[in-house]
Amino acid sequence: MVDGPASTATLEPNRHGELLAHLPEPDYTRPLLTLSAEHRQRIVDLLGLMYGPPEAERIFPELERLLRVYYAHKPQALVEADAAFTPAERFSERDVVLITYGDLLTTPGRPPLQVLASFLRRFMHGAINTVHMLPFFPYSSDRGFSIVDYEEVDPRLGSWDDIAVLAAEFRLMFDGVFNHASSRSRWFQQFLNGHPGYHDFFVAFTTKDAIDPDYLRLILRPRTSDLLTPFHTINGTRFVWTTFSPDQVDLNFRSPRVLLRVVEILLAYVQRGADVVRLDAVTYIWRELGTSCAHLRETHALVQLFRAILDVAAPRVALITETNVPHVDNISYFGNGVDEAQLVYNFALPPLVLHTFHTGSCETLARWAASLTPISETANYFNFLSSHDGVGLLGARGILTDEEVAGLVDRTIAHGGFVSYRSIGDGTQSPYELNITWYSALNREGSGESQELQVARFLAARAIALALRGVPGIYLPTLFGAKNDTEAVLAGAEKRSINRRTYDEASLMRLLDDRECWVGQVARGMRRLIRRRIEQPAFHPNAGQEVLELGPEVFALLRDRPGVQRLLALTNVTATQVRVQIPVERLGGARLWRDVLSRARYQADEGVLSIALRPYGVVWITMV
C-alpha cells in the first residue's frame, strides 16, 4: 500500500499498548481478510446508491482487493487488538486533541516535525494525547489544503519517519482532503494531457455558461470566487469545477476510479499511523445540478462507505467530518449515530462562546447547549473554539440573529481582525468567517483593561469548551494566547494568515517561562485546565450533561458519570464578581464539595451551596 522504503524509526507502544507500525510488505501467508455477508452487503448497497446496482457489483471486487492488501500489512498484534476493540471506549476524558501545522514551530537546522515532537514532549507531556497534523503533504496553495501529492511528506517539514515517531507517542489525526486536489497535482496534469485514465477525475465543461443560471443560484458556495475556472487542455479549453479557489480542482466521485484511488489513499493513511481521519469540506464532495450540491444523499453515502471500510479493515480508526454549515445540517453527519462520523466539528460553539463573552450573557449559549442530546455511545462532538482557519459563522445561523452575527463582525473588525465572505444565490455576499486569533477576538489592544483580566477572560472561554460533553480540540497557538498577525495579512497574505504565524522554538520557550508576559500566563493556565480536565471521569464524552440556569452571568454545566463522579462546572462570563446560590438537591444532595482547579472546599449551608466567582472565574467542583 505504501510506496518507498519502510520506516527506520524506532517505535514504542502508544498509550493503548499497541504497536501501530504496519508491516513494510504484505504477508500473504496468513489468512486473507474475509468480509462477512453483512459487511459485504452494506458496502455493495452503498456503492449501489452512488453508482447503481450493476456498477456496484463491478466495483466491489476491486474494493475488496484493496481491503485485503491493506489487511495483509497488519501485524498479528494489531489484528488481535482490532478484534478485541470496543467502539464505545474509543474516547475518554483523557482525550485532548492538539491541532497544528507541521511547521508552526521552527529551529534552524532541524526538520519542523522533529521540532514539534520535542516541543510536545517538553511542554505538553501528560496533557495532550492526540495530535491533528494539518496537511503535511506537498501543496501549491491554501496552506496545505491544495495537495500536489497525497502520499508524500512535504520535504520542507520532514519525512514519513518523523510522522512515525509522532505516531508512536500520540494518536494522530490526518486530513483526508478528498473534495479537491491541486491544479498542479499529477492527477490534474494527466487530465490536462488527455490521459484516458483521468478524463473523468474532475468535473469539467466545454463552455463557461454550461450551468444554467437558475441551477447556479441553487449551489451553496463557501467562497466568492467563480465556481468554474478555465484551463487549457490538449482538447481545448475546459471549465473545471473549483468550489474553493482556482487552484483547488474538485474531484469527481461520480467516477468509480476516483473513489477507488481515494480509498487506497485512505487505507495508506491508516497504514502510516492515522487514528482519526478528518474529511475536509465533505459537504461539497458530490455534485448534482439542480440541487444545492451540499449534503446530498450520495455525500452521506460516501461518508457511510468510508465508515464501513474502516469498520471492516481498521475499526479503531475514526472519522471526523469538517462541515462548516448550519448546526442542523452539521449534525446530520452523525447519520444514525453508528453509521457515519464518530466525531463532528461543533461549528456552532465558537461563535456562540464569542457572543457570550462579548455580551456578558450566556443565555443563548445555555439554551443551545441544553438542546445537545447524546448521539450514541460511539459518536460525539468535537469541541473547538479556534482553528487554523477562523471562526466560522454558518454554524450559528438560526441560533444567533442576523443582528447578533453583525455584532460579531463589527467586534472582529474593531479588534483588528478581518472577515471573509461567501456568495449567495441572489448575487450578494454574506459573512462566512471571522479571521482573528481567539485571544484578540476576546481582548482588544489598547482597551485599558488589565492583562490579568484579559488572560482570565481567555481562560474562561477555553474552560467552557473543555467542560462540554465531547472531545476537545485546541489549536496550538491558542495554548499560549497568540495575538493577531495583522502584518502578514497587510503584506499580501490571505486573511487566514492572521492566525498562522510560525514561531522560533527557543524564543517561544523563553516567553512561556516568563511569568510576567501574557504568553506564559496563558500557557500555565491552559496546561492547568487541561491536566485537571483529563483527571475527571465526569468529563468522559459519554457522561451525562445538564445545563443549570443560574442567571445570565454564569454558564453552569452539571456533568455526571453515575457511580463514579458528579462535577459542576461554573464559568463567570462577565468582568464583575458574581455569587451563585445552588440548592444542593439539584446537585444530588451532597453538602461538601471541592474545586479540582484551586483545591478550595465548599460546604452547603441550610441546603444551599454559595459560591463567589471572581471576574471570569472558573470553578469545577466535585462531591467530597
Image (tube, rainbow, N blue to C red):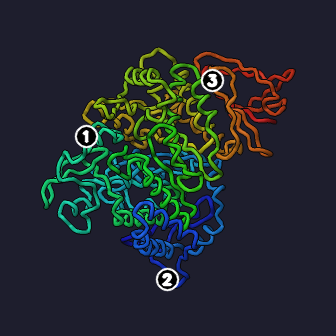
Q: What element carries label 1?
A: helix
User: Do the residues under discs 3 and 1 have CB atoms within 8 angstroms?
Assistant: no
Mark 3–mark 2 CB contact (< 8 Å): no
Disc number for residue 457:
none
Can you give x and y, in whole percent of width and height, for residue 90 in the image?
A: 62, 55
| Badge number at residue 213 | 1
Outermost residue toward the bottom? 29
Residue 479 seen in the current view: no
Residue drawn at (72%, 20%), measured in percent from left and top? 580
Q: In the displayed structure, does residue 566 sit left or right of residue 430?
A: right
Q: Seen in the image, is 328 located left or right of residue 194?
A: right
Mark in front: 1 vs 2: 1
Task: Please say if 526 is above or below 564.
Answer: above
Q: For the residue marked with disc 2, what is the amino acid? A: Tyr
Sequence-wise first label, 3 or 2: 2
Q: Please state which amino acid type lies under the numbered disc 3.
A: Asn
> 513 or 139, which lies in front?
139
Label for residue 572?
Answer: 3
Circle 2: element type:
loop
Residue for badge 2: 28
Q: Give the quadrant of the N terminus.
A: bottom left
